[in-house]
Image: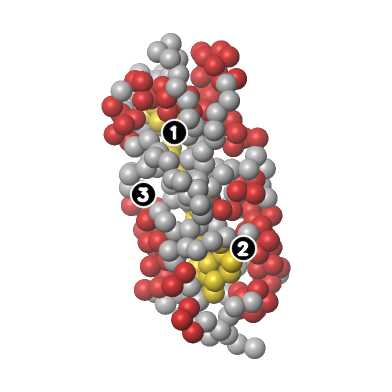
């Protein structure tokens, strides 16, 4: 049976079996994942349906004062520590299996966690950066997050015992005092910042170009666990549409890309992605 790409207004592919059959015909798939794939690992999707979106710190705010940086680093450390305790879920393992089946040409993620890597996926492109490295904004020196975190904990004692609400961008609600010591570059004394794309910051143009090239050469774009509210994700869908690459959207709740989807599957990525991965093998 052959399924031709159809527009959502005349959708012919509307069951998981049909979607899996369509997916199985794809040979060069680009995967784009969002916060939804990590929610079952215990990382909340604060942009998810019904959840108010809190304002994340902007780069301007981060640069504006030492107090802002203390607040950022205190929260960011709690977020990072939480990320380290989380484990990949069936969504991440399904994507790793798709890659092992030789059908993925790129894995793009909006997530700053590294759960795809922990599930065994290689060459993940982090559109919004990751929490695992830290860079000096002055000299560009890069540090492992673990080393910076050790220094942070050593300098700030029991501060981190306090409870915090963890946010998926690795930031948490905290208000450290003036005595909170933030890390600085040991090479030049410059300001250190995790390699995460801050709210309002633009995505590295090299990463965008690389992602576009992957999509142009693909025969499917699988969007998993993203409501596509963030512009960087929607750009990928629009690129696929211009290149006539079928878009498959798997998400719990509506997405901004639904009208461009050839296949739209409603539900948890932990349930649906394993079925699609099975279809490829
Ligand atoms: Zn430096």
3 and 2 marks in contact (CB < 8 Å)? no
Which residue is found at the position 67% from the left and 43% from the top? 87
Q: Residues within 10 Å of mark 1 (few under 14, many from 20)?
A: many
Q: Secondary structure at mark 3?
A: loop
- The residue at the point 51 percent across, 54 percent down is 49
Q: Earlier in the sequence, mark 3 or mark 1?
A: 1
Q: Measure the alpha-carbon separation of dots 3 and 2.
A: 28 Å
**Foreground disc of the pair 3, 2:** 2
Location of residue 152 with respect to 85 vertically, above or below? above
Q: Label 3 vs label 1: CA separation?
A: 15 Å
Rendered image: mark on residue 267: 2
Furthest residue toward top: 179
Q: Earlier in the sequence, mark 1 or mark 2?
A: 1
Residue at horizontal 34 percent and vertical 37 percent from the top: 58
Give percent across and percent down for residue 161.
60, 20
**Apparent side of residue 85 relative to residue 56 in the rendered image (left or right):** right
**Mark 3 or 2, nearer chain start:** 3
Q: Residues within 10 Å of mark 3 (few under 14, many from 20)?
A: some
Identify the secondary structure beneath mark 2. loop
Outermost bottom residue? 1
Q: Quadrant of the C terminus?
A: bottom right
The quarter holding residue 1 reads bottom right
- Label 2 near label 1: C-beta < 8 Å? no
| Residue behind mark 1 | 194
| Residue on which the image places disc 3 | 203
Establish if 148 lies above or below 127: above
Residue 265 is at least partly visible in this image: yes
Residue 141's place in the image compared with 44, above or below, is above
Q: Is residue 99 visible?
A: no
Q: Confirm if mark 1 falls within 8 A of ligand 1.
A: no
Distance from disc 1 to disc 2, alpha carbons, whole Å, reads 32 Å
């Amino acid at each position: 049976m052959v399924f031709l790409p159809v527009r959502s207004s005349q959708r012919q592919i509307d069951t998981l079996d049909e979607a899996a059959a369509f997916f199985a015909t794809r040979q060069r798939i680009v995967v784009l994942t969002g916060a939804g794939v990590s929610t079952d690992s215990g990382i909340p999707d604060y942009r998810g349906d019904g959840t108010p979106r809190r304002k994340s710190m902007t780069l301007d705010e981060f640069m504006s004062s030492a107090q802002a940086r203390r607040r950022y680093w205190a929260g960011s450390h709690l977020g990072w520590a939480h990320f380290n305790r989380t484990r990949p879920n069936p969504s991440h393992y399904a994507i790793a299996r798709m890659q092992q089946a030789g059908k993925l040409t790129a894995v793009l993620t909006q997530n700053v966690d590294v759960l795809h890597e922990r599930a065994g996926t290689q060459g993940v492109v982090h559109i919004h950066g990751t929490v695992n490295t830290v860079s000096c904004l002055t000299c560009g020196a890069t540090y492992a997050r673990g080393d910076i975190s050790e220094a942070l904990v050593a300098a700030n004692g029991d501060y981190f015992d306090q409870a915090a609400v963890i946010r998926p961008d690795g930031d948490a609600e905290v208000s450290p005092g003036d005595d909170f010591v933030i890390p600085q570059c040991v090479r030049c004394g410059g300001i250190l910042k995790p390699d995460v794309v801050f709210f309002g910051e633009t995505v590295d143009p090299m990463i965008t170009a690389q992602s576009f090239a992957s999509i142009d050469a693909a025969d499917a774009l699988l969007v998993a666990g993203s409501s596509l509210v963030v512009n960087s994700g929607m750009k990928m869908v629009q690129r696929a549409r211009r290149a006539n690459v079928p878009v498959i959207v798997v998400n719990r709740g509506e997405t901004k890309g639904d009208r461009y989807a050839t296949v739209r599957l409603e539900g948890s990525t932990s349930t649906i992605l394993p079925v699609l991965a099975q279809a490829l093998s």
